[in-house]
Amino acid sequence: MASKPRDSATASSPIGLLLIAGAVVSVGLLIVVPLASVFVEALANGPHAWWAALAEDPDTRHAIWLSLTVAPIAVLINTIFGVAAAWLVARFRFPGRSLLVSLFDVPFSVSPVVAGLALVLIFGRQGLLGPTLAWLAVKVIFAWPGLVLATTFVTLPLVVRELIPVMEAIGPEEEMAAVSLGASGWQVFWRVTLPNIRWALLHGIVLANARAMGEFGAVYVVSGHIAGATDTMPLRVEKLFQEYRTPASMAVASVLAGLALITLVAKVVIERQLEAESKELAAARATGADTDPSTGGLGS
Amino acid sequence: MSIRVAGVSKSFGTFKALDNVSLDVPQGTLLALLGPSGSGKTTLLRIIAGLEWPDSGRIEEDGTDITDRHARQREVGFVFQHYALFRHMSVFENVAFGMRVRKAPQAEVKARVDELLHLVRLDGLGGRKPSQLSGGQRQRVALARALAIRPRILLLDEPFGALDAKVRVELRQWLRRLHDEIGMTTVFVTHDQEEAFELADDVVVMNEGHVEQRGKPDEVFDKPATPFVMDFLGNVNVYHGRVENGQAFWHDVPIAYPEYPHAQARPARVFLRPPELDIARAATAGAAPAVESEKSLPATVLRLTRTGAITRITCQPLEGGGELNVDLPTVAAREMAFLPGEQVTITPRSVRVFLPDPEYVI
């Protein structure tokens, strides 16, 4: 914990001080100063200009609205997928299980641009499913369903990766106990599994949401970059910047940066809860050598 | 409710957990499944509960085949080894769970939970979280939770394994009384023979996926059916001797063994329990070694180990072979005041002989 007093001998030694100074300078230069400058630039002409840049440009308004729609849909899909996949992996042993777990990580290792291109190759007009989609009159690429697909793809590992270790640590016993007490599958899930994983799930959702809001590469490829139609917030920032409308660009960027700060706070709060829960789990497992006064009378 | 297990087998990958196990548990019996870890006892318990499916064989309740019945519909109360209490629920809600999922009316739930908490002596602790309870209290919550659904069979997996010695003894006497009051068919799994013998009406000793022996505690202890049971029941002295002409030989000491009247000698294992050996001081030093009784084995005392009321005397037979343990009540051992290095004679009061392959005996 950062707040705990350090070993003074280490902290005051020249090398210790040098390392601390190095860490402070690099974090400051790489994170704090750029982030602060976004807000400074965005508010350079005062809050009225900031608000006007966000609210009075219909394309910017649309971009904000689109981001606030696409990200929650992608996160919802990932939540459902993540819980189901984590349950499968943590509770069952089957051939191909470890392959499946490695596949969950593909979105982390593939460049988002490549992911976007892959989606175009499948869902685009010339793509694999192009004719079928055209016949059904469904537009995926250069439309919001494409944005949802691309965002879902890049955020896919976040929820499931968060849940697997937690579900494995908790183990299946509570769920088995619930079944033996007569609970149906849904009752087991809602009454036992979900309450046990709720903080890990929330953690995954917060991270996935942050990633979904900020996604650029994959979304760039599938969106076609149509102002007022398929531009999300990050795309709008880039476009305004390219058009030399730096204050407006910074205003949108400051909204994204603000979201990042909120995410950070939420993350810290949730991680505290997670830590408390894992301690509780450890305590529950401990084979407490107990001096329990109330069992005292049983033997007599 | 009686239980019948008929020819049940179960494998996990290449590991054969249960190999054609059959077992009858009459109504109202308190039965112990005793065995080392990996003997298949927990798997058998879970199959009876419907938490695990057998590869082959049947489970019957009162003559009805329930093999394909889901755990949910079996009306079995199951107490898990580490209790598996619902961590985020209060004690009250833990006990109420089985009734809540059956949508029982609130008043009925309240009455039943209060009654059960009283039964397991946890009155007033309904509002606590499981993490705020001691091990013994958690165990009793798990029991109350299992009883709340009015099961017809109660199954307990290592019910006292995680408790300290004192609480364990109290809780098992209490469970015995509870069983006598309720009279429910109960099966519990344990690796602790003391627990099995003290608590159970019937003991089933399991090893490597099959039943080695079944019987009343006294029967199993006095007449172990197999070398495994003999060995598992504790700390026996094993001697690789021989049988011939109706006698088994422990070193040179002959022991009557009419089951093998043949002249041809066969190797056999001789088992002697430490408390069933008599030990006496050999003839006084200086005198020529007296002709010892034919039934005794001369040995040297190596060391004495006191474990509470019992003192274990470890001896080395003069003619070689492995060490030999003799248990004496500590009071008697103190009177005798044996010292390491002393010469003694050891006389068995009772011996069990097992031929390596009994089927070969004509």
Image (cartoon, coloured by chain):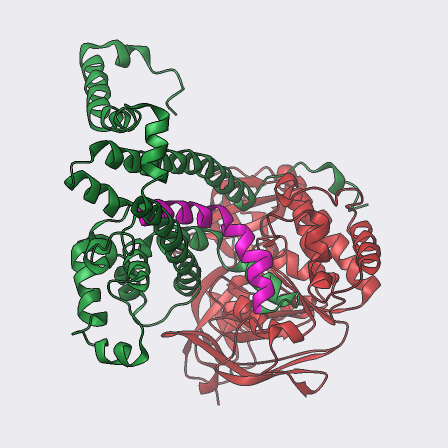
Chain colours: A green, B red
Q: Is residue A30 left or right of residue A146?
A: left
Q: Is residue A35 left or right of residue B264?
A: left
In-front residue for pair A224/B35? A224
Query: Does any portion of residue A151 appear in the rendered image?
Result: yes
In-front residue for pair B266/A261? A261
Q: Position of residue B41 (x, y in %)?
A: 54, 68
Indicate yes or no whether the magenta region holds residue A111: no
Q: Is residue B19 left or right of residue A53?
A: right
Q: How many marks?
A: 0
In-front residue for pair B86/B259? B86
Q: Position of residue A294 (x, y in %)?
A: 75, 40
Indicate yes or no whether the magenta region holds residue A205: yes
Q: Residue at x 46, y 65 (%)?
A: B38
In-front residue for pair B129/B20? B129
Q: What is the magenta range?
A: A185-212
Does A47 appear above or below A197?
A: above
